[in-house]
Image (tube, rainbow, N blue to C red):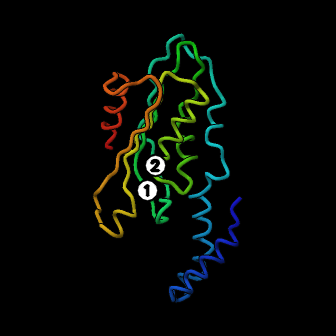
Amino acid sequence: MIDVDKVASSIADLMLAFGVEIDSHTADTPRRVAEAWAENLAGYDDDPAAHLDATFDGPSDPGLVVLSGIQLISTCAHHLLPITGVATVAYRPRPGAPIVGLSKLARVLHGYARRLQIQEQIGYQVVDAIRRKLDPVGAACILTASHGCISTRGVAEHGALTTTQAIIGEWQPGHPDLQAILAEHSARGA
């Protein structure tokens, strides 16, 4: 549970340390920032994999399930700056195995993203949760994102994007499922 009062007090101390003038615009900033951070880091109060517990009977061969265009918003564990982008989550259920509601795939991603993160870890956590809960033929999470730590400081590469792929299961490079997932991810503007 996030202690919003303690976070607000820390933000007030930070502003004081930077010599920020307190006026009508900044007087309530510590509380607003604390509430924003509580929302951004709400994933610590959640077990994202639990969203995959509610399953439905699937058809004898449900085929490839791909949810693309998922908005990714996370926070860099190294600099506390935003990571924003788009994600594709996919899995192929085993014949006759249960399936999950499509929104659950997005909920799993959001649950892991709402923590201090690195992009590679988010993808791994998503596919590992799918592996543990659904035992699919394969699962993939492809993320393309802009990192505030690259665009707003240091190297200052404003248009740089990072793409990561976490893939587990029986899929090998060049597998038709993977080709379809990559094509869908690319088509969504990533």
Left or right relative to 156: residue 125? right
Q: Which mark is residue 151?
A: none
Disc 2 crowd rating (10 Å Cα; few below 14, some 14-19, many 20+) is many
- Residue assigned mark 1: 83
Q: Which residue is mark 2?
A: 72
What is the number of callouts on the image? Answer: 2
Give the camera-side residue of 16 and 27. Answer: 16
Mark 2 falls on what kind of element?
strand
Q: Measured from the top left, where is residue 26 in percent x and y? A: 55, 81
The residue lying toward the viewer, choosing from 73 and 138, is: 138
In this rendering, the answer to whether 180 lies above or below 8 is above
Q: Quadrant of residue 146?
A: bottom left
Q: CA distance from mark 1 to mark 2?
A: 8 Å
Instruction: Looking at the image, tell me whether mark 1 or mark 2 is earlier in sequence order.
Output: 2
Q: Nearer the viewer, residue 25 or 133?
A: 133
Q: Give the amino acid type for the residue marked by disc 2 in the picture.
A: Leu
Q: Is residue 172 left or right of residue 9?
A: left
Do the residues under discs 1 and 2 have CB atoms within 8 angstroms?
Answer: yes
